[in-house]
Image: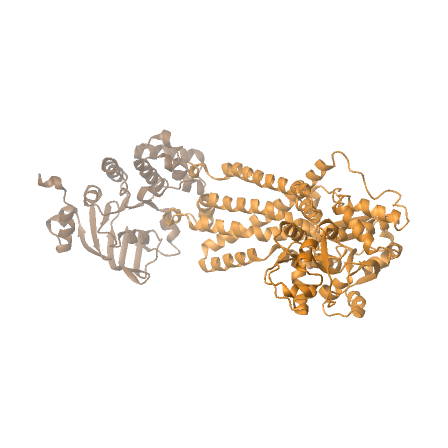
Amino acid sequence: MGPPRTTGRPVLTRALVLVALLGSSCARAPTGSDAARTPLRIGSKTFTESVILGEIAAALAQGHGQSVVHRRALGGTQIVFGALVAGEIDLYAEYTGTLTQEILRGVSDDAVPSALAARGIIMGPRLGFDDSYALGMKAERAAALGIARISDLAAHPELRFAFSNEFMDRADGWRGLRAAYQLPQRSVRGVDHEIAYRGLDAGDADVVDLYSTDPEIVEHRLRLLEDDRHHFPTYAAVWLYRDEFARRAPDTVAQLDAVAGRISSPAMTAMNLRAKRDRVAEETIAAEFIAHDLGAPPSANGTVAPRAPDGWLHALGQRTLEHLFLVSVSLLLAIVVAVPLGIAAARRPTLGRVILGLTEILQTVPSLALLVFMIPLLGIGEAPAIVALFVYSLLPIVRNTYAGLRGIPPSLREVATALGLGPGASLRAIELPLASPSILAGIKTSAVINVGTATLGALVGAGGYGQPILTGIRLDDVRLILEGAVPAALLALGVERIFDVVEKMVVPRGLRL
Amino acid sequence: MLELCGVSKRFAGAEVLRGVDLVAPAGVTTVLIGPSGCGKSTVLRLMIGLLAPDGGVVRFDGAEVGPRTVDAVRARTGYVIQDGGLFPHLTARDNVTLMARHRGWAAARVQHRVDELVALTRFPGDALGRYPVELSGGQRQRVGLMRALMLDPDVILLDEPMAALDPLVRAELQADLRAIFRALGKTVVLVTHDLTEAGRLGDTIRLMRDGAVVQSGTLAELVRAPRDEFVSHFINAQRSPLEGL
């Protein structure tokens, strides 16, 4: 699979982009004459089918002369839909069931278009296939237990369920299913969808949730359990696009809507299998589908750039830059904020308890939740990732600054005062140098944790080493996972070494003897 | 020079000083002595404004020590604590010259003063570049003294400066301190619990107990005419075994 189709910007200009992102959220709607030059921004969720559909949309639009940016595998439903509403992307493929059950909870099928219109979003016609939820088991195990329908599960309370986290939380997911079928199982775990299959193979789980076009049904020889009480709603694939984009580029939208009804369930399953089992790049699959099934030639200028021999190195360099950018900007911001907070906490005990308490609470906010909260405010890309990393960097630095200052023997602080140094001079000349080993250790802790946490930045399109990790998990490709995980680990070690050097430069020699 | 009038001080409800009246005359060395917890260090910290009295008045050269005067008081006072109280991240030289540099002294003036102090305190000049952990206990104390003397203060306060030193080093330093104080003619207030030290260094002694001054006078006066049983008890407890030989 090729490098992510995002434009490569030099790191320095990224800082300016970030400032612009932070500063303004408006003034994004371009006017008609810019239509061809303003790229169509397509999003996709973190699973292969969504990425393939995104590539199909990209190829169709490009065939029509429209420039395209595809922000692949941006995140889950909340993140991608949030990005669409926020105007960070123009289009992505969604499912009707997800709209009624999750995004617009409680809105009837008929009312969906108007509810979306209220958010400036248009739902296109159905693409053809239905990718509804289903439950699956290993075929031989299902046969041995005599399970063919979901209602048969009620007689086997010992079975272990491993469901995708999204399925666990959705109204039509596990909660609704349990009520509809009166299921007694107690061992029910929420895991990543792709990891659930591994649990199934390893014998750690008996039942997983599936999408009815999943290639794993073939690959892992699974039996789909019949939804005999018709619990799961229909999940017909549709395009969702921004009203404003439809007005700006009506021809492109017409081109996309022309696909209506032409992507069948078997065709979609076959494409998913091509990506997963045969490791064919999504853009290639999309191009083949357009050529063979839609009978249209791929775009003249070619959507798929063949991978250059140095593509791997280039991608690694690009990701390293992206990763370093996320880590360094967030860490610098955190130092600028956290050190003064730590000083304030050390000087005023009551205020200190409040500051430490608040930073501790921030630390407990789950990173994914934090990222989702920030999309309406900051959109997608580096800004929300940097803010999240900034938030998680605060506690170690605040705490170590506080501890370092409080750890100075009171007699030394008294001597500084008695000598005639005021509070500011004492802080600069005596207290901060004495606390510097502790403060630096806090910054180092934050930096190393940041290198790891920054891999989550890929969830909101910030790039970095998380990109291949996410794709690798999605495609069940260990090599790809390692392509992100190994450099991240090496970078963490490198950061440690860098801080050893910084320590030699910053910490006064008298404290190191 | 330094004067406490009816000074009381409480810490967390416990009365540490109860109406202390005390004078440290100009140009002589006054020793505050007494058992642990008698409040002698508290008196010193009140004199340099690290603490404010709960009752009574502390005066420096006739003016009350308070928020408005405390900076001026500190500028005219040198302060030495046990083991020197040196800043571990600064070399001996940087410890000594910290306040002069803070006040913007020219390098030549700083160097001249350091040369004077090295000679005065008999500190090995080549050790000025060392950090406190690289110095002996006696050397650290000499650096602490140089730092206190750097701005040529009128008053020097010393809080148990030699408590952590071994006897030979202590005796040598005591002799040097006496010579230095005599030569400079400064107002010195020294806190100790060691009667020998009090006798060697002090022109006049204030014996304290439970937050009050029990008796004032020279060592000879305290020995000859102890005011009460506590005074004679305190003196006898510190008599050297050598005296009986």
- In this rendering, position of residue A250 left or right of residue A491: right
- In this rendering, position of residue A362 left or right of residue A49: left
Figure disc tally:
0
Q: Quadrant of residue A230?
A: bottom right
**Near-viewer residue (B109 or A460):** A460
Supply the letter of whichever chain is orange: A
- How far across and how far down the image is residue B115, in percent? 36, 32
Q: Quadrant of residue A178?
A: bottom right
Residue at the outermost left position: B245
**Near-viewer residue (B159 or A102):** A102
Residue at the outermost top position: B126
Image quadrant containing the C terminus of chain B: top left
- In this rendering, position of residue A415 left or right of residue A258: left
**Residue A144 is at least partly visible in this image:** yes
- Does residue A146 sit above or below A296 in this rendering? below
**Residue A65 is at least partly visible in this image:** no
Which residue is at a point 19% across and 43% down the rendered structure image? B196
- How far across and how far down the image is residue B242, in percent? 12, 39
Which residue is at a point 89% across and 51% down the rendered structure image? A294
Q: How is the image coloured?
A: by chain
- How far across and how far down the image is residue A339, in percent? 52, 50
Rendering colour (chain B) = brown
- In this rendering, position of residue A173 left or right of residue B13: right
- How far across and how far down the image is residue B94, in percent? 41, 37
